[in-house]
Amino acid sequence: MKTSFLGRALVLSALVSHVAMADELPLPAFEGGIGVDPLAGVTSTGGSALNVVRGVSPGGFPWRISHLRAEVRQEGRIRVEGRGLLLTGGNGIGTTGGQRVFATLFCGPPADATAHSSSAAGVALEANGDFRIDDTLAPAPPAACTNPVLLIVSAANGHWFAAAIPASDER
């Protein structure tokens, strides 16, 4: 009887640790970033086409980012580290423009991607453009996030300033 109980306890322990590990599996990871260029090109009528990504409009001026790294966990936990997110045009060139930012992860094909965001209150950019986001996405992303796109978004107006580059499988 004791052997049977111990055997069941070991199996249950293995299952619990396996489930706990599954909750800790990373979803998409990102390494590197691209600052926004507000214009995507010229329309067929000669006008300017805005660089809208997954329905999110770009910031009004170009931005640059020197480093961006992000990881998303199964339960929706997101950690983002950004460096050097600064304006590259206008009178505020070389500054943060006093912005606060948050992260939005899109999963799914472009036409119907679902948005999962950290707190819209955002975090303040340091004077040199550095920032850290350690938050939970709402709603939590699906277990399999296909076609992931991660945008760094202005808390003031919801426009995107930077996009993350998906990490390669060699990470």
Image (cartoon, helix red, strand yellow):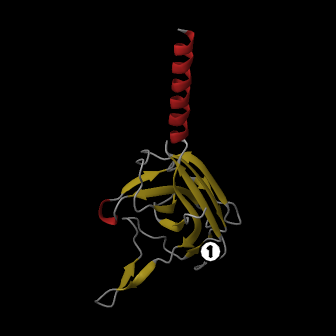
Would you say 134 lies left or right of 53 here?
Answer: right
90 or 81, nearer to the observer: 81
Considering only vertical position in the picture, is 72 above or below 56?
Answer: above
> Does residue 98 show up?
no
Q: Position of residue 50 (x, y in %)?
A: 39, 77
Of residue 106 and residue 12, the one placed in the foreground of this image is 12
Q: Is residue 38 above or below residue 149?
A: below
Task: Please indicate whether residue 88 sits to the left or right of residue 137 in the image.
Answer: right
Q: Amino acid at mark 1?
A: Gly
Q: Which residue is mark 1?
A: 92
The quadrant the C terminus occupies is bottom right
The percent position of residue 147, horizontal first and vertical second, equals 40, 63
Residue 143 versus residue 41: which sits nearer the camera? 143
**In the orientation shown, which residue stands out farthest toward the top?**
1
Residue located 45% across and 45% down the image: 138
Q: Which structural element holds mark 1?
A: loop
Quarter of the figure with residue 169: bottom right
